[in-house]
Amino acid sequence: MITPVILSGGSGTRLWPLSRSGRPKQLLPLTADQTMLQLTVARATGDGFGAPIIVANAAHAEEIEQQLAAADQPDGLIILEPSARNTAPAIALAAFAAAPDATLLVMPSDHVISDVAAFHAAIRRARPLVDQGWMITFGIAAHAPETGYGYICRGDELAPGVHRVERFVEKPDLATAQSYLDQGCYSWNGGIFLFTAGAFIEALETQAPAMAIAAREAVAQARRDNQRLHPDPVAFGRSPADSIDYAVMEKADRVAVVPVEMGWSDVGSWDALHELARKDNAGNASHGDVIALDTRNCLIRSEGPVVAAVGVQNLIIVATEDAVLILPRGDSQQVKRAIAELQKDGHVTLHRPL
């Protein structure tokens, strides 16, 4: 059985004002009737999959419990991080909470995978190597010279559809990203992994021993409250903060990549959501009480008030009960400028859930 480990600790500022620290994007129904978290759980449910482990912020515990129950996963374990320490310590908590021989499928909670069958086929290709002690990352088919993603260079083929990782590279500039695309041996790093708990712990103990000690002690001294596991905050607080790529995957010896094309998106911006959404004949993606007249290629979303857009194009318009965001399409990453301005005064719309 594969144990899904779902990382749900994000703060969600890139999709403000809809997503906020009190209710980040993984807890919202952005691309379907189900929330991003529920969709992630659903793609690792059924034959061959066990109950999930969710590693999350304590502030979201009740909401996550309710969403797991609604997704017919009431037995999922929710590990509540005492503090944010990045992905490597979060995964370490799950690995120490699981059985040493458990196979862990580590996934972010806020990504889209439209071709689940292709994802499952990639998992099946990886399993024989995982059983031999390899740690697997899934390389997303790169369609454009994206500068916002890390990349994975594929090396020798170890088995059909499975390659040794030649190297991991960080987010490149545009010219470098284009060269990666031209070479044809690079994939985007989507942050999805498959390995046994024992293999990950062994690599962690070798590459980041202080992190391994802190996570082990935090789980050993944890308090259990029904399906919630509260790691010891003092022990966990001694862990260095680092990503799984930096702490483990870039340094370990037996690391392989399975390239896969599975309709993946990290839904990292309003532009990405516009690309994923169903659009009308004028290229508009609308949600909620929206009127669009002589309007083209816009994303218009309302969580309350009616939004009337007349004679505009290439805009992102998002309205909630207490905030409105308007941006040019293609420049939605600039929401971070609005966030920075709001943070100066600790504006309530950054934190208050809708």
Image (tube, rainbow, N blue to C red):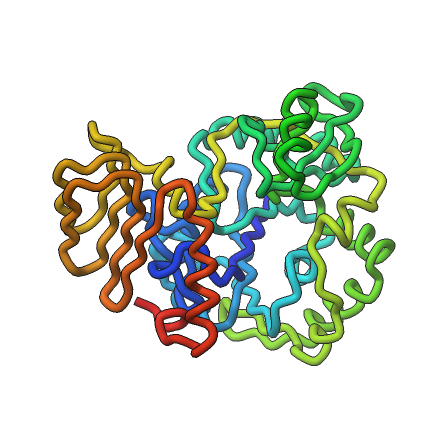
Nearest the camera: 127 or 112? Answer: 112
Apparent side of residue 113 relative to residue 234 in the rendered image (left or right): left
Q: Residue at the spot x=29%, y=46% of the render?
A: 33
Q: Is residue 39 above or below residue 242?
A: above
Nearest the camera: 290 or 251? Answer: 290
Q: Residue at the spot x=16%, y=40% of the render?
A: 311
The C terminus lies in quadrant: bottom left
Q: Quadrant of residue 315?
A: top left
Residue 314 rendering spot, x and y as whole percentages: 30, 39
Q: Quadrant of residue 217?
A: bottom right
Apparent side of residue 200 relative to residue 110 in the rendered image (left or right): right
Residue 183 rendering spot, x and y as whole percentages: 69, 21
Q: Residue at the spot x=70%, y=43% of the render?
A: 170
- Is residue 126 visible from the viewing direction of this image? no
Apparent side of residue 37 relative to residue 121 in the rendered image (left or right): left
Residue 60 rendering spot, x and y as whole percentages: 44, 68
Apparent side of residue 264 relative to residue 312 in the rendered image (left or right): right
- Is residue 47 visible from the viewing direction of this image? yes
Residue 1 rendering spot, x and y as whole percentages: 60, 42
Q: Residue at the spot x=35%, y=45% of the render?
A: 328
